[in-house]
Image: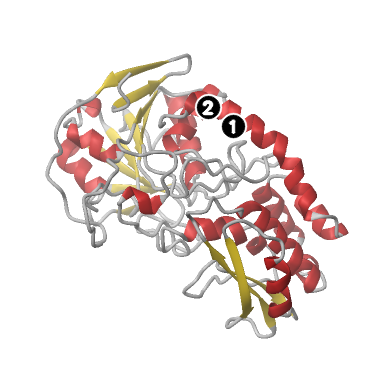
Amino acid sequence: MDRRSFLQVGAVGAAKVCMAGGLVGAATPARAWPLARKPHVMLGIDRLAAENFTLLAGKRVGFITNQTSVDQSGAMSRVVLQRGLGSNLTALFGPEHGLDTRAKAGDHVDNARDPVTGLTAFSLYGQHRKPTPDMLSNVDVLVFDIQDIGVRSYTYISTMILAMEACGEAGKEFVVLDRPNPMGGALVQGPPLLPGFQSFVSQVPVPYLHGLTIGELAQMAIAKSWVTPAPKLTVVEMAGWQRAMNWAATGLGWVPTSPNIPHWQSPYYCATTGILGELKQVDIGIGTRKPFHFAAGPGINGRTMASDLTRLGLRGLKFRPYRSRTKRGFGGVEVLINPNDTPDLMPAAMALCAEVVARSGKAPLTASPASTRSLFDKVYGSQALWQTLTTDASWQDLVTDWASSLTAFETERRPFLLYN
C-alpha cells in the first residue's frame, strides 16, 4: 500500500485512500527562518493542500492550532486553510500557551478573536479543557495541527485526546495533520502511567517518551479505547519522514512550541530535567536563555556532582559544574546532550532527581507542599519516584522496573506505526 496516503481510522477498522497532486501557493510565514534547502519532509498540512483540501470539501471546519502550525515554507496553517476553505473554516481552538504560544505554563488563556484570520479562537486552556457542544455547533469536522514534542506530560497531546472525545460524543469527525516527533520515532524510554494517575499532564497510558507522532498516537488511542466514544478519525500522513529522523534531519524550520521550548533540541532537555523541575527549591534554568539545561539545588557542590554523574557513563550526556544565576547559593550541573547518540534521557532524569534531592539535604521534598507532590506524581505517572527519593532507594531500580512495560509498549504500538 502506498505510504503517501491518508489513513482513515474508525472505531472498528481502517481504510487508506491514496493521494497525489501538486502544492498550492505559500501563505505568509508565521515566523521567518532560513532554509538552506527544501525540507526533506512534507507535513500533513502540505499533503492536505496538495490535494486541494478535498478531504474537507463541503464541511464546516474547526481548527485546533497555534503558532507551531505551519507548512513546509513556514506559512501559518490557519492562513493556508482559510485560503483553501474560505468561509468553511468556521472556528479556531487554542491549547495551553495560547495561539501565539507566549502564555507561560499553567497560565489561564481566554477566548479571543484571532487577528490573523478574524475568527473566534476558543481556548482549551481556560474555562474548558475540552470543546463544548456549543463550541462545536458550527463544526462538522475538527482538524488538529499542532507540533508536539514527544513527552507524555506536554499538554498538547492531552488537548488532542479530549478534543477527540468531544467529537465522539457530538458525532463530529476528527482529522490529524501529522507532524514529526522531534526526538524521532525510536526513542522509547521512561516510566509507564499507572491507573489512578491519569491527568491533563498524563492523559494517555504511554511511556514518558513514547516515540510516536501525533497521528500515530491518535490512531492508537482509538484502537486501545483510550477515547470513548470514538470519532471517525482521519490521519493525513507525512511524506518523507522516517523513524530514525530527529528534527534536524527533516530540514524543517523550528517554531518554538512554548516559551521554554525555544529550539529543536529543547524537547531532549525538557525530558531530562522537566520532572525534577516540578519540585520546589530546584533550578532547571527556567527564566534563563537555556531552559531545562540545568539541575541544581541549595548548597550543592557542582564540581563534585558533575564528576560523579560523568562516572555513570550515561550515553549521549555530559555534565559540567553550574552555579545558579537566578537562585543564590544553588549549585549543580549543566546538562549537555548529543541528540544524535540515542541519549539515555530518562535514566539521566532519574539520576538528576536523586542527586539534587540527596545533595541538598532533601530540601526539594520538604519544601514541596501536598499539591506539588500530587502534580509531581501525576507527571511521573506513579508514586514510585517520590518514594525512591524519600527513602534514598536506588534510582537504578526504577529504570529496571520500567523494562517490562517498555517492551510491552513497543509490541503494542507496532500496529499503529505509519512510517518505516
For label 1, the crowd category at 10 Å Cα-Cα, with few meaning under 14, some 14 to 19 and many 20 or more, is: some
The type of residue carrying mark 1 is: Glu
The type of residue carrying mark 2 is: Arg
Residue assigned mark 2: 414
Depth order, front residue of 287/39: 39
The image shows residue 258 at horizontal and vertical percentages of 44, 59
Left/right of residue 214 with respect to residue 361 in the rendered view: left
Q: Which mark is residue 272?
A: none
Q: Residue furthest right?
A: 391
The image shows residue 396 at horizontal and vertical percentages of 77, 52
Q: What's the residue at 52%, 22% (across, down)?
A: 223
Q: What's the residue at 69%, 85% (across, down)?
A: 329
Circles 2 and 1 in contact, beta carbons < 8 Å: yes
Q: Using the image, determine if residue 359 lies above or below residue 114.
A: below
The image shows residue 194 at horizontal and vertical percentages of 71, 38
Q: Which mark is residue 410?
A: 1
Left/right of residue 325 with respect to residue 69 in the rendered view: right
